[in-house]
Image (spheres, grey):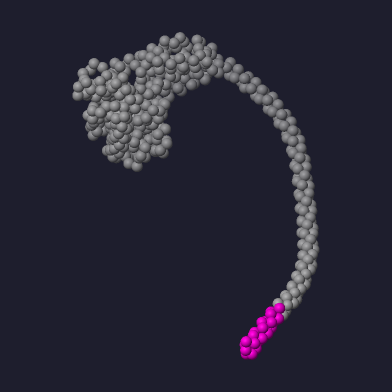
């Protein structure tokens, strides 16, 4: 090894030792600095903690002082309120005491006044008796002088005056009555004849049964179906009875509801044309027929309202009008009847200078209750009145509905015209199928049922058979008996008679006491 290499090696070793010494010196220096910094931080932290505790104690004292002040203020305010309330209660107590004292004084005053009044009343009664005695003495003296009693004198004077007045009154009444009757009859004839002439309508009598023609008698078996399932399905879905008898190539549909009967007719005709008759197909066809009938009802309602010139009707009323297309009354179509009544009423109202539009409206809606009287309890008058009330129709329309059969006195001239137009339309030759003989039999049957009860003196069927008035013998029936009798008569009428709408049974018990003054 050369000298140069040895010197280089020594230098390297010296440098390494120097580096190690410097490293340890640096570590020691950093440790000393860090210990100084930690000591400073701990002392600073201790100072901060002491300062925080000091501030917290001061804040605590301040809060306690503020709370004591608030409590003191609240206590003062409460004491002030209590003092005011005590004062108010004392004032109220004093007022109550004053009122009680005042009432006691008033009661004492009233009692004294009552005593005075009682004394005055006794004096008045005494004077009244004296006056009556004086009056009676004078009457006795007058009767003695005139040789007539008071009643005889009154009767004589009144009789002579009554005869004179009666004679003049009879003459005037006869004159006015004859003139009024002549003028009113001529005017009524002119108006009614003009209305009839200007409104001529043809009628086709409609039945309460429908007949469906069959292509052949074999179709009857298909309609009945296996074990009657087809006919049961059709009757169940429509609510109509199918009458299949020996009538060749025809099926009769019988039902109380005309709309259901129409649905059944349309359904059966479509099934016959289609040829596929089974419960599922029947249900589908019936649903389609219902929609078709509802559409027809809407169209017919709009049509008749347009023809009558009646606008701004509620949609439900229009629908009810359309339903009357399938409603008949003694064979007369109710929708056509209502239209004719509307036209007649409008014509007569025009002749009299009344509101033509309102008159047509009242005439068109006078039988609106017949559209749902099959479904609702009560007569078509009551049902119709409820309908127009529900949809806020004009009071004149309501009056026309309520009075067109004489159930109440009409309150308007238009109601009278509706009543007259209804009679004209119903009385038109061929309009209604019920004969006079059938009508008389129904009335006689009604009176016969009423007269069959013990204690009934007489009975009268009025309002075209819609009401019966029964007079009973008061000595044989008391007030409780007539209630039971009325109920029994109603039951017999329901069981033994067939009639449209309802019949009012009115049982009357009257006691009269008659005596004669002699």
Picture quarter with the C terminus: top right
Most extreme residue toward the bottom is 3
Would residue 128 appear left or right of 479 to someone viewing this image? Answer: right
Predominant secondary structure, magenta span: helix
Report the front residue among 395 and 62. 62
- Image quarter in which the N terminus is found: bottom right
The picture places residue 352, in percent across and down from the top left corner, at 31, 36
Q: Residue at x 30, y 28 (%)?
A: 282
Q: Is residue 318 left or right of residue 215?
A: right
Residue 358 sits above or below residue 171 on the image: below
Residue at position x 38%, y 14% in the image: 496
Q: Is residue 311 above or below residue 52?
A: above
Residue 333 found in image quarter: top left
The picture places residue 441, in percent across and down from the top left corner, at: 32, 15
Q: Is residue 47 visible?
A: yes
Quarter of image, res 336: top left
- The image position of residue 191, as x and y in percent, is 27, 33
325 drawn magenta: no
Front residue of 223/252: it is 223
């Amino acid at each position: 090894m050369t000298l140069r290499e040895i010197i280089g090696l020594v230098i390297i070793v010296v440098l390494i030792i120097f580096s190690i010494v410097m490293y340890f010196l640096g570590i020691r220096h950093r440790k000393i600095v860090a210990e100084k910094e930690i000591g400073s931080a701990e002392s600073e932290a201790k100072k901060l903690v002491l300062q925080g505790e000091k501030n917290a104690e001061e804040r605590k004292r301040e809060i306690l002082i503020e709370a004591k002040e608030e409590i003191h203020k609240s206590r003062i305010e409460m004491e002030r309120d209590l003092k005011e309330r005590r004062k108010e209660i004392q004032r109220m107590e004093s007022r109550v005491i004053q009122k009680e004292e005042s009432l006691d004084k008033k009661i004492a005053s009233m009692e004294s006044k009552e005593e005075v009044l009682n004394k005055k009343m006794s004096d008045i009664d005494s004077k009244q008796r004296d006056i009556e005695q004086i009056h009676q003495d004078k009457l006795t003296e007058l009767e003695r002088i005139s040789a007539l009693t008071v009643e005889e004198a009154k009767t004589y004077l009144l009789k002579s005056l009554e005869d004179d007045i009666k004679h003049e009154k009879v003459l005037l009444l006869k004159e006015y009555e004859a003139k009024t009757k002549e003028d009113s009859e001529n005017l009524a004839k002119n108006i009614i004849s003009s209305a009839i002439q200007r409104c001529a309508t043809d009628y086709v009598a409609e039945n309460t049964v429908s007949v469906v023609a069959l292509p052949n008698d074999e179709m009857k078996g298909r309609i009945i179906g296996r074990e009657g399932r087809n006919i049961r399905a059709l009757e169940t879905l429509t609510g109509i009875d199918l009458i299949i008898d020996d009538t060749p190539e025809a099926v009769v549909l019988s039902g109380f509801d005309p709309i259901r009967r129409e649905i059944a007719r349309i359904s059966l005709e479509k099934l016959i044309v289609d040829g596929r008759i089974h419960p599922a197909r029947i249900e589908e066809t019936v649903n389609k027929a219902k929609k078709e009938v509802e559409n027809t009802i809407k169209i017919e309602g709009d049509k008749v309202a347009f023809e009558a010139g009646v606008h701004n009707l509620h949609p439900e009323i229009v629908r009810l009008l359309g339903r009357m297309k399938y409603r008949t009354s003694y064979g007369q179509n109710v929708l056509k009847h209502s239209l004719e009544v509307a036209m007649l009423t409008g014509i007569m109202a025009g002749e009299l200078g009344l509101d033509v539009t309102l008159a047509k409206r009242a005439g068109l809606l006078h039988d609106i209750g017949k559209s749902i009287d099959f479904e609702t309890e009560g007569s078509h008058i009551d049902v119709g009145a409820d309908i127009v009330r529900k949809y806020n129709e004009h009071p004149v329309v309501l009056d026309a509905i309520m009075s067109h059969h004489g159930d109440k006195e009409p309150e308007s001239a238009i109601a009278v015209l509706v009543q007259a137009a209804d009679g004209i339309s119903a009385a038109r030759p061929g309009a209604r199928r019920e004969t006079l003989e059938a009508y008389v039999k129904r009335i006689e049957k009604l009176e016969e049922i009423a007269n069959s009860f013990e204690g009934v003196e007489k009975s009268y069927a009025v309002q075209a058979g819609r009401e019966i008035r029964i007079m009973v013998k008061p000595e044989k029936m008391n007030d409780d008996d007539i209630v039971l009798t009325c109920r029994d008569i109603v039951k017999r009428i329901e069981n033994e008679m067939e009639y449209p709408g309802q019949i009012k049974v009115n049982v009357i018990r009257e006691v009269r006491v008659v005596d004669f003054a002699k």
